[in-house]
Image (spheres, coloured by chain):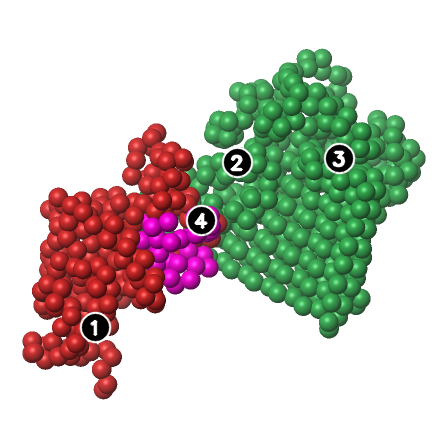
Amino acid sequence: MADANQLGLGGEYKYGFKDNIAPILTTGEGLTEETVRQISAAKNEPDWMLDFRLKAFKRYQEMELPDFGPDLSVLDLDHINYFRRDSDRIARKWEDVPADIKKTFDRLGVPEAERKYLAGSSAQYESEVVYHNMRKDFEDLGIVFMDTDSAVQEYPDLVRKYFGKLIPPSDNKFAALNSAVWSGGTFIYVPKGVRTEIPIQSYFRINAGNSGQFERTLIIVDEGASVNYVEGCTAPNYSQDSLHAAVVEVNVLRDAYCRYTTIQNWSDNVYSLETKRARAQENATMEWVDGNLGSKVTMKYPSVYLNGEGARGTMLSIAFAGKNIDSDTGARMIHNAKNTSSSIVSKSLCKDGGRVDYRGKVRFGRHSDGSFSHVECDTIILDEKSASDTIPFNEIKNGNVSMEHEAKVSKISEEQLYYLMSRGISEEKATEMIIMGFVEPFTKELPMEYAVELNRLIEYQMEGSVG
Amino acid sequence: MTTLEVKDLHVSIEGKNILKGVNLKMKTGEIHAIMGPNGTGKSTLSEAIMGHPAYQVTQGEVLLDGVNILDKPVDERARAGLFLAMQYPAEIPGVTNAEFIRGAINARRPEDDPMSIRAFLKELDKTMSVLDMTEEMAERYLNEGFSGGEKKRNEILQMMMIKPKFAILDEIDSGLDIDALKVVSRGVNKMRGPEFGSLIITHYQRLLNYIVPDVVHVMMGGRIVKQGGPELAKRLEDEGYAGLRDELGLDIKLVDEEA
């Protein structure tokens, strides 16, 4: 996370905290139909949204937990607080923030004020100045960038047209849950033909809306438009909520382009169960760039539905599973039209007993003539305690397509270590160099300040892996 | 002046004895060549000196200025002044050549005093031009997709940048055409001087026309069986290893010999 000047946004950036904590509004523990109604009422939502939530809640009650991946049975869904007004959150005391999180902030050079925010020890992190400047620039271009709650009020037609269409509540239990109790998230609309080089970063929006457990993000990139959206941050995000279940829907219309970059580093008490899906219409391009570093459990398989002829979809991901981390991530590419292409490049690392699995799917539908997919999974297992599996699933309904799949699981190569050490480089530095090289195809796609931070973070996590 | 001494070195790999008591002594300012037929243990000698984990020293010592280095890890041996230009250097994806070489140089300097990027790039440019290497070679990933010849040049580039006391060149001539051979030789000859010694392993005399050695050792059956001046290399080229073996009355089977 960098400050505004480093990000080249200019303008004044003041850190500060609000001390006027609003009265507490919370639905308390547990989830009933009444809770869902309360949430909707608190937001003054139109009836269609309340209906959507109620139907989703019904589905949620009927559905089972996923029958694959990490064990979720320990999640105590009855004792979760499903809704709190963001500004009402009671700040934890700085002294209560775990020491290892504080140490990581030190190592990453996260500014003082930001640390408190990330650690959940400040109710507000004042980024509104930057957010407002940024919004102004985008407004001049006609781009809408706001939290999804506000979008429901201000752009009801647009939201209603796209909301829940790519990911219906029935998709999976946690998508249904999100649909019932969602709050916050990002809404972006880029009008026809508008192309912007400046990345849109959610970081500056988070406080203006709600951050939290059940974010709902909706992006529409209209015909011929282009957008580059960056969410999350590299620094560990200490959340008091044990369950995070976001839903992200991205619509990339004809000839449009969207890149969606996520870096996620939740603290290791969090279950992060996300549903992310995009559709790419004729000649459109959707690129997911996805980094997962923390969380107790992550289940996330961003997908691209290649629905228009000539559409392209890519996924470039990195997962780093350390102690107590179970990361089950991957991608899905669904080829539904002629001459579509997709590429999945997945890089995984595990150490200190971490588990990192790739779970992916490529589907060539009946009408996918001339389509092509390339899948590449590379894993480095750093010690005996850690484990990894690659679980690819291919479904091919058309004879005129081609597909490549490469998977490699390895340890740090002794030959590589020997070579680097024979030049005087210590074993620790050499290991770090090999790991940095391994993740380089990912980091080079990140905005500079994220790349620098990610490198520092990996360096830090690699310490003590030798000897 | 620094000395490198190999004393009664026995080395095995996967339980098989390859070196059976090698003795050799050299100082900086000298260039020695080791010649010998295939499969005689020349590369084993170089890997054992450097410390490749697959090679087990069962007896003997390697002394650098009188200090045994065999109990030291590979990186310490390197920082003490040893360098091995490898026959098959590893590929390291994602790490640029320049980044790696700078890392190697900085590993020899105090942590708070790394070589400045400016000074480094200046020297790198200069050295690469001696070796007729294009600028893009600095930014490519280390050895990844390098041709055989590019790898060899890159080994010599590292040697010239790191400036070791002793460089062992393990078949640096294999697979090189005559032009590349001249370039590589130019690099080694540029290093020649009182602070630098080199041990050149080859089985052809051709390289030694360009880098003239002070001493030639002939190795057969895991031992050094004869020493001489540059003229010994020429004689081997004319007469072959079998001739020398028979003259010395050795009972060694040459790998390439018909059964």
Q: Of residues A376 and A153, which is closer to you in this image?
A: A376
Q: CA distance from mark 1 to mark 2?
A: 51 Å
What range of the chain is rendered magenta? B129-158
Q: Which residue is mark 3?
A: A186
* Percent position of residue A238, x then y: 59, 31
Chain bearing mark 4: B
On residue B37, the disc is 1
Front residue of A95 and B146? B146
Which secondary structure lies at badge 3?
Answer: strand
**Residue B94 x, y percent position in the rendering:** 48, 49
Q: Residue furthest right?
A: A47
Q: CA distance from mark 1 to mark 4?
A: 37 Å
Asked whether the beta carbons under mark 4 and mark 2 sit within 8 Å of each other, the answer is no
Q: Position of residue A270 (x, y in %)?
A: 61, 38
- Circle 1: residue type: Pro
Is circle 1 on the same chain as circle 2? no
